[in-house]
């Protein structure tokens, strides 16, 4: 059975059962679940959900979605979602990073920084497209410092990331100017 047959719209009455449901998201709704309609197979959903067990049984290779993860939409611009409660089931073409839960928070903050946005925009820019498109293989080519040794303050993400990469004042000015 396909995903489209498993998606339904969550209503107030069904809200208490949310723990056994996944919230379905795509590139347009990654950070706007419930605030923007998801259109799937010509059907519109305001609160698209599916039963967790049904999806896992249908897609056994996606069991990695059960844990904490970063979900990335990168068509044009970078949109990130840190799913620390395993509430979301991403439809394609979203990228998912899962691994050591301790490092996911730091990686999420790193990917949220101006520096990484600038790097992705300048490195993975697609001809004829505003912004960039990131693929799984591209993630491996991102120069990421040892996250074990980085201390990232969520209130000072950019400062911490610039420091982790040992950027000069001049380099920071170039990045900040180009992102405006």
Image (tube, rainbow, N blue to C red):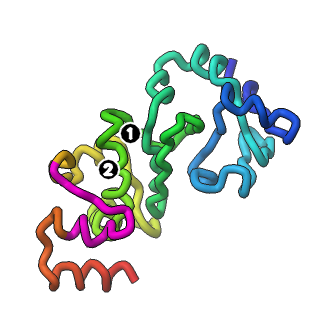
The residue at the point 77 percent across, 33 percent down is 16
Crowding near the residue tagged with mark 2, few <14, some 14–19, many ≥20 C-alpha atoms within 10 Å: some
Check the image and name the residue furthest to the right. 13
Q: Secondary structure at mark 1?
A: strand
Examine the image and state in which quarter residue 97 appears. Answer: top left
Residue drawn at x 31%, y 51% is: 106
Q: How far apart are the alpha carbons under marks 2 and 1? A: 9 Å
Position of residue 109 measured from the top left corner of the image (x, y, whole percent): 35, 57
- Magenta-highlighted stretch: main secondary structure? helix
Residue 151 covered by magenta stretch: yes
Q: Position of residue 27 (x, y in %)?
A: 57, 51
- Residue drawn at 79 percent across, 37 percent down: 15
Image coords of residue 38 (percent x, y): 71, 48
List the residue tagged with mark 2.
107
Point out residue 60 in the picture as x, y percentages from the top left corner.
51, 16
Q: Nearer the viewer, residue 18 or 75?
A: 18
Tell me, for residue 97, which label it has, or none. Answer: 1
Say what secondary structure mark 2 lies in: helix
Q: Magenta stretch containing residue 109, yes or no?
A: no
Q: Which is more toward the observer, 94 or 124?
A: 94
Q: Is residue 169 left or right of residue 74?
A: left
The first of marks 2 and 1 along the sequence is 1
Q: Nearer the viewer, mark 2 or mark 1?
A: 2
- Magenta segment range? 149-162
Q: Quadrant of residue 121?
A: bottom left
Q: Is residue 129 left or right of residue 24?
A: left
Is there CB contact under 8 Å for labels 2 and 1? yes
């Amino acid at each position: 059975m396909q995903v489209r047959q498993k998606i339904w719209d969550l209503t107030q009455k069904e809200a208490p059962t949310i723990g056994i449901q996944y919230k379905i998201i795509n590139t347009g709704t990654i950070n706007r679940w419930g605030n923007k309609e998801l259109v799937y197979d010509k059907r519109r959903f305001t609160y698209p959900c599916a039963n967790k067990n049904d999806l896992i049984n249908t897609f056994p290779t996606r069991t990695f979605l059960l844990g904490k993860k970063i979900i990335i939409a990168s068509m044009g611009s970078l949109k990130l979602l840190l799913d620390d409660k395993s509430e979301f089931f991403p439809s394609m073409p979203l990228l998912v990073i899962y691994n050591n839960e301790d490092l996911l928070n730091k990686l999420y903050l790193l990917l949220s920084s101006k520096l990484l946005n600038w790097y992705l925009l300048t490195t993975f820019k697609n001809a004829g497209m505003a912004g960039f498109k990131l693929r799984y293989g591209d993630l491996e080519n991102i120069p990421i410092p040892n996250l074990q040794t980085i201390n990232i303050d969520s209130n000072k993400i950019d400062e911490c990331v610039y420091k982790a990469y040992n950027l000069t004042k001049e380099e920071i000015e170039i990045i900040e100017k180009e992102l405006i």
